[in-house]
């Protein structure tokens, strides 16, 4: 007698209707192992942008993409000893490269770049 087992799998997708939690400046700093002044420098060089203008950094709020950018800047500083101006340029170039690759792929022109 031969035993046959059937394996089934299911995938579920959820969509949240609750607005995403915005990070306060001090939460962003803590998540990156940095100080609030470092977050202010990130805003100054354009690596992250506040979701609503506020004079005091304590009142700033950030999106999850800002956390990703801040962490990437922190890694560039740690791994390559670059300043935040250079990190901003590197991150901009990386974003532009990803955008251009996606554009090429959408037109069927992708290659191993």
Image (cartoon, rainbow, N blue to C red):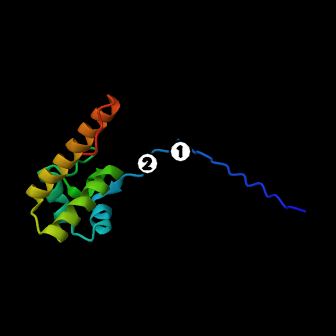
Query: Looking at the image, is 32 positioned above or below residue 18?
Result: below
Q: Is residue 8 visible?
A: yes
Is 106 in front, or is 17?
A: 106
Q: Is residue 63 visible?
A: no
Circle 1: is it few (<14), some (14-19), or many (20+) Cα within 10 Å? Answer: few
Residue at x 32% of width, y 28% of height: 107
Quarter containing the C terminus: top left
Quarter containing the N terminus: bottom right
Circle 2: is it few (<14), some (14-19), or many (20+) Cα within 10 Å? Answer: few
Question: Residue at the top extreme?
Answer: 107
List x then y, in percent, for residue 29.
27, 65
Using the numbered discs, state the Cα–Cα distance from disc 1 to disc 2 in whole angstroms.
9 Å
Q: Report if the CB atoms under discs 1 and 2 are less than 8 Å apart.
A: yes
Q: Which residue is mark 2?
A: 20
Query: Looking at the image, is 83 positioned above or below residue 64?
Result: below
List x then y, in percent, for residue 37.
16, 64
Is 41 in front, or is 91?
A: 91
* Residue 39 falls left or right of residue 102: left
Is 65 in front, or is 3?
A: 3
Q: Quadrant of residue 25?
A: bottom left
List x then y, in percent, for residue 75.
23, 66
Assign a secondary structure to mark 1.
Answer: loop
Question: Residue at the front extreme?
Answer: 1
List x then y, in percent, for residue 21.
42, 52
Residue at x 12% of width, y 59% of height: 84
Q: Quadrant of residue 99?
A: top left
């Amino acid at each position: 007698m031969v035993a046959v087992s059937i394996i089934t799998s299911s995938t579920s997708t959820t969509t949240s209707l609750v607005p995403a939690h915005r990070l306060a400046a001090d939460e962003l700093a803590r998540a990156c192992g940095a100080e609030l002044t470092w977050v202010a420098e990130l805003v100054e060089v354009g690596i992250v942008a506040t979701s609503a203008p506020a004079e005091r950094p304590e009142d700033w709020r950030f999106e999850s993409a800002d956390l990703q950018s801040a962490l990437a800047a922190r890694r560039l500083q740690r791994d390559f000893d670059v300043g935040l101006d250079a990190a901003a340029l590197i991150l901009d170039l990386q974003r532009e490269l990803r955008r251009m690759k996606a554009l090429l792929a959408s037109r069927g022109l992708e290659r191993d770049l």
